[in-house]
Image (cartoon, grey):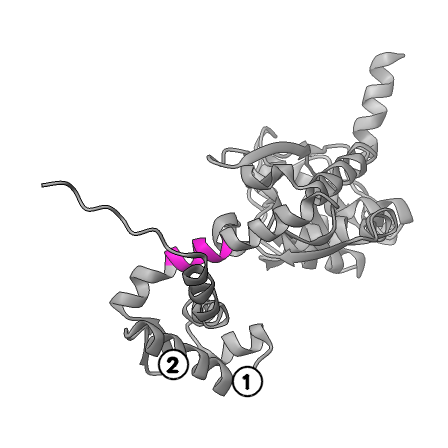
Amino acid sequence: MPGKTRTRREPAQDAAIARRLPLGSLRVFVMVAECRSFTLAADALGVSVSAASMQVRSLEEYLGLPLLRRSGRIVEPTAEGAQLLPRIREGLAALQFAIDDARAARGVGTLHISALPSFVVQWLSPRLQDFEKRHPQIQLRVEASHVAVDFAATGIHAAVRFGAGDWPGIYTEKLLDEWLVPVCRPDLLEKLGPVETHADLPRYRLLHSTTEPWTIWLSGLPNARWPDTGLGFDDSAAIVRLAAAGAGLALARWSLISEEVRSGTLAIASRRITPFGRRYYFVCSPKARGLKKLEAFRTWLFEQAAQFAAPPALDERKRGSRS
């Protein structure tokens, strides 16, 4: 018995399907499922809670399936919703990339970038005006986030990540090296003096960051002891602001303090500057590499990185070795 042949759809049928496909409702469903709240999802989408609820209800009627259920104040996907969610995410992301590809020939449109909040505030933001002047046709949208980007699920085109560079499945290119530098306000340094060993630290009120601990700076020093006094924060940019306000001595990433040191707001308090094991990397989805607007941003970003100098003490050592 001959096998069944698949009936070819007519163009009119495809058009009818396209007209019926509830793209808006799919987008709302994904946002509610990710936020686990109609209120948070509505705020993120810029619509009312009732409108978001109506969109999800319309999608459930369209599919004939319950997609979400309430558990107290939390909204969770049903078994059917959880099964559909990743496929809808991928479909919406693929649609976004298709639109981006259509615009790529002109290199215009919105470009979505993600980076650490501290890097965005202290390093990237002061330089973005230059990018806007050079590329007024590109609307840059920057997401400040600690979360590693899922490019397929979010529609974000590229990111600046901080780490070891070992992220499989994505395009990765080293952008910047990093150093840890003890800094404080110049008047505080003049009053209390420089720090070269662990014995010098007790003169200062120390500012501790969970991501840049003083133990890294102490590594290799004889009889080094963990300095457990002072203020502790999990926000690297907050440590910089506190040091600039005169609150104490901070061990900070050079990328976050270079402008403050250049302007004289902060002073380097030690000749002991420590290379950090983590670095900044430019990363993106392999699919996005062909976008002209992304390549324009990448080229500009690496130009900025090439102009970014190492800490002065390291520059002086380099000059000394050449003389």
| Callout in the foreground (1, 2) | 2
Q: Residues within 10 Å of mark 1 (few under 14, many from 20)?
A: some
For residue 90: magenta? Answer: yes
Q: Amino acid at mark 1?
A: Ser
Q: Which residue is mark 2?
A: 57
Magenta-tinted stretch: 86-93
Quadrant location, the C terminus: top right
The residue shown at (50%, 33%) is: 166
- Where is residue 63 shown, x and y percent of the image? 32, 71
In the picture, measured across the screen, residue 21 lies left or right of residue 238, that is: left
The residue shown at (39%, 75%) is: 59
- In the rendered image, the vertical position of residue 69 relative to residue 320, given as above or below: below
- In the rendered image, the vertical position of residue 11 relative to residue 197, given as above or below: below
For residue 249: magenta? Answer: no
Which badge, 1 or 2, comes first in the chain's sequence? 1
The residue shown at (41%, 72%) is: 36
User: Seen from this angle, which residue lies furthest top?
Assistant: 323
Q: Which residue is mark 1?
A: 48
Q: Amino acid at mark 2?
A: Arg
Q: Disc 1 versus disc 2: distance between alpha carbons?
A: 14 Å
Quadrant location, the N terminus: top left
Q: Quadrant of residue 198?
A: top right
